[in-house]
Image (tube, coloured by chain):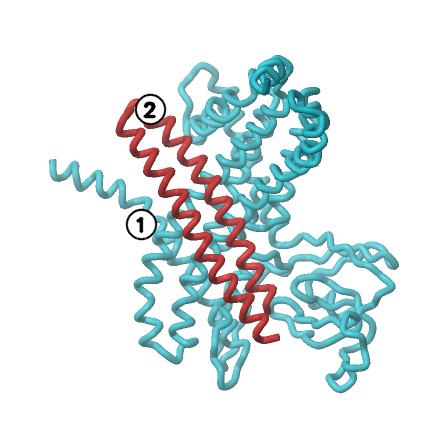
Amino acid sequence: MLLEAAFGVMGAGIGAGLVAIGAGLGIGQLAGKAVESMARQPEASGDIRGAMILTAAFIEGVALFGEVVCLLAVLGGK
Amino acid sequence: MLTEYIESRIKFLKPVGISLIIFLISSLFNFSSLQASSEGNQGESKKVDVAALMIHHVTDTHDWHFLDIPGGDGHYTSVAIHLPWILYNTQTGLEYYGNTEDLLSTGKYVVSHEHVIPVKGIAIPDSLQASFPAESLVHADGGHGHSDAGVFEKDGTTTVLDFSITKTVLQIMIVGLMLILVFTSVAKSYRTRTGQAPKGLQSLLEPVILFVRDDIAKPNLQGKHDKFLPYLLTLFFFIWFSNILGLTPLNSNIAGNVSVSVALAILTFLITTLNASKSYWGHIFWFPGVPLPVKFLMLPVEIVGMFTKPFALTVRLFANIAAGHLMVLALIGLIFILGEGGTNVAGGLGIAPLTIAFGLFIFCLEVLVAAVQAYVFTLLTAVFIGQAMEDHSHDHAEGAHAHH
């Protein structure tokens, strides 16, 4: 029983790490490409920034799905 | 040159200073409740249950707890507003209690994790608990600051629905009232100052209103934006105001409560569905331009897709706001974990500068997130309504053509 709860907490910790890796990769790709395109076309900076924020919110949303699941795994193990 | 530079720096520092003050004040309140909870488990262990405190902070309660004032004898006086319990009992009808003490004094109910549960009789002593089936027992915790803790037998014959004005409900009313006051004043100044430059509150909010109209509604709603603008503006300002209020001391965060974001997403879902065009339903029930077996395959996918959109809206808003609050609380809680509830002063003081720096960073980020989430929720609502209203009839031919 204790072991099961411990596995739950461990899983949540590993999950949180994986979520951070995924979200970091996503946001990094997004921001890198956005900065590159802003450098190529500075006059389109405003539009690019808007699209970037929106997409970043999507990525963050997915990451937060993961975080909620991790939180549930920890709280459910108690 | 130098004075200009310094002035520009000061202008930049002003909002930072204000955020710092807000952050320090709110940490003060969190601090007091942390102390109180460390007082709760007296004895050899002074461990602070930071996780429980964090969860308590983001969940709904039946009293609006402000702070605890330490007394001389190690006890704390809790400063809180008790909110009324309004219950519908399936046997005795509508019931009203001024506060949790009144509710508990009837002996008919106990409170467990802010849920009211009907019980029969008095607490069951430990020795007799084994004779009851586990699922018929409830562990009462009495809610914050109350003490009816014990194990009771559930009363299975009656069901209770809780319509109480809880902290979240009261905060929704406050935000609603604020919206009414602010926007009637803005609307009035548009009437009285027709043709003149905007002034005061009006000039503060005009760019935001125009932003919602020109950047959110117009590009997505194909000329029908006037019909949906009232909803989109309400949505945007409700989420924005409530998020910003949730970051200030003495207020509660309501978008971080999943029930609130579900309600907002259901409104969006209803408006999307009720304004859907024929081709929207056509795409759901009989996907055009694909072979017959694929049509049957697409049916469940499209039906699930209808519901995943509002579900994603719900989780995105709720998780973003709740996660921000939890992050700040976890960072502050670090002081109390490493300080071991006041016994390890060096540990507490050592981590404090780091905690304040990171906490302030997250807090400033949350001010940004408050606006970004309002923007994203409103934008996606506009996108979903726009997609549902769209008439795809001429796209079908192209789609079918592309498939051949």
Q: Position of residue B305 (x, y in %)?
A: 64, 36
| Residue B275 visible in the snapshot | no
**Quick check: marks 2 and 1 in contact, CB under 8 Å?**
no
B180 horizontally vs A24: left or right: right
Chain to which mark 1 belongs? B
Q: Nearer the viewer, residue B291 or B146?
A: B291
Q: Which mark is residue B369?
A: none
Can you say whether B335 is above or below A22 in the image? below
Q: Which residue is mark 1?
A: B17
Q: Which chain is cyan?
A: B
Q: Which residue is mark 2?
A: A44
Q: Position of residue B125 (x, y in %)?
A: 75, 83
Crowdedness near tag 1: few (<14), some (14–19) or many (≥20) residues, C-alpha within 10 Å: few
| Residue B84 visible in the snapshot | yes
Crowdedness near tag 2: few (<14), some (14–19) or many (≥20) residues, C-alpha within 10 Å: few
Mark 2 and mark 1: span between their CA atoms? 33 Å
Q: Quadrant of residue B233?
A: top right
Can you say whether B290 is above or below B114 in the image? above
Inspect the image, locate mark 1, and give the three-letter code of the amino acid beneath it. Answer: Gly
